Structures are given as C-alpha cells and as structure tokens.
Amino acid sequence: MATSYDRIYAIVKQIPRGRVATYGQIASLAGLSGHARQVGYALHALHEGHDVPWHRVINAAGRISRRSGSDYDELQRILLEAEGVSFDGQDRIALDRFGWRR
C-alpha cells in the first residue's frame, strides 16, 4: 500500500510542463483533503536526484510559497518561467490560465 507521500508524488508527477497545481489541489487528489501542509512537507522531504516536478506546486493565492533559509523560491520561479509560466506584477500566476485541470 502506498504511503501518503507516495500518493502525493504520484499526483505531482502528473502535472504537465507549463502548468501548476496548488498544495490543496494535490492534497485532495491524493485523498488527503484539508491537508495541504502535508503536501508541502512531502515535497520538502524529496531527496536529491528525484524526478518529482516539485516546482509546479504553488499556494492557493497563485504564488510561490517562500521558504526561509533557502533560495528554492527563486529557483522555482526560474524553473516555471523556463516552462512558459508567467507572473503578474504582484508575483502571482494566473491559475485560470496556467492551472492544471485533472
């Protein structure tokens, strides 16, 4: 039986290039409704060399969640922009345009 982290990773792997999903959306799809933070914990626990496109997961406001003590938020933006995802003047991603619909 898959762990909750395994289910989260399997869902995140389905997000296509140039699309984003929210932590809450991933939680719901993984059968963990109401546990958006668990998605964040799972993504934080990824080991080097993984193939999970963690950068495609953002918060419900359409923004990259800032991580204290790291520059992953900057890396996440670079990776998303390289896939064609754009940000508005308030650093938001238009979920109606770039949001993943499963």
Image (spheres, rainbow, N blue to C red):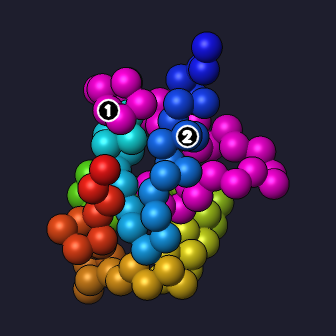
Residue at image point 24% right, 65% down = 95
Give the labeled residue for mark 2: 10
Decide: is 3 above or below 38. above
Please state which of the two labelled residues, at mark 2 or mark 1, is closer to the viewer.
Answer: 2
* Helix, strand or loop under label 2: helix
Left or right for 48, reference 81? right
Place residue 78 in its image quadrant.
bottom right
Q: Amino acid at mark 2?
A: Ala
- Residue situated in front as seen by the camera: 5 or 100: 100
Residue 55 colored magenta? yes
x, y percentage for residue 45? Answer: 67, 38
Q: From which residue to which does the magenta span run?
A: 28-57
Give the labeled residue for mark 1: 28
State the CA–CA distance, disc 2 to disc 1: 13 Å
x, y percentage for residue 98? Answer: 30, 71
x, y percentage for residue 37? Answer: 42, 34
Residue at image point 45% right, 57% down = 15
Q: Amino acid at mark 1?
A: Ser
Q: Quadrant of the N terminus?
A: top right
Residue at image point 32% right, 59% down = 100
Place residue 36 in its image quadrant.
top left
Place residue 86 in its image quadrant.
bottom left
**Residue at the left extreme, as displayed:** 96
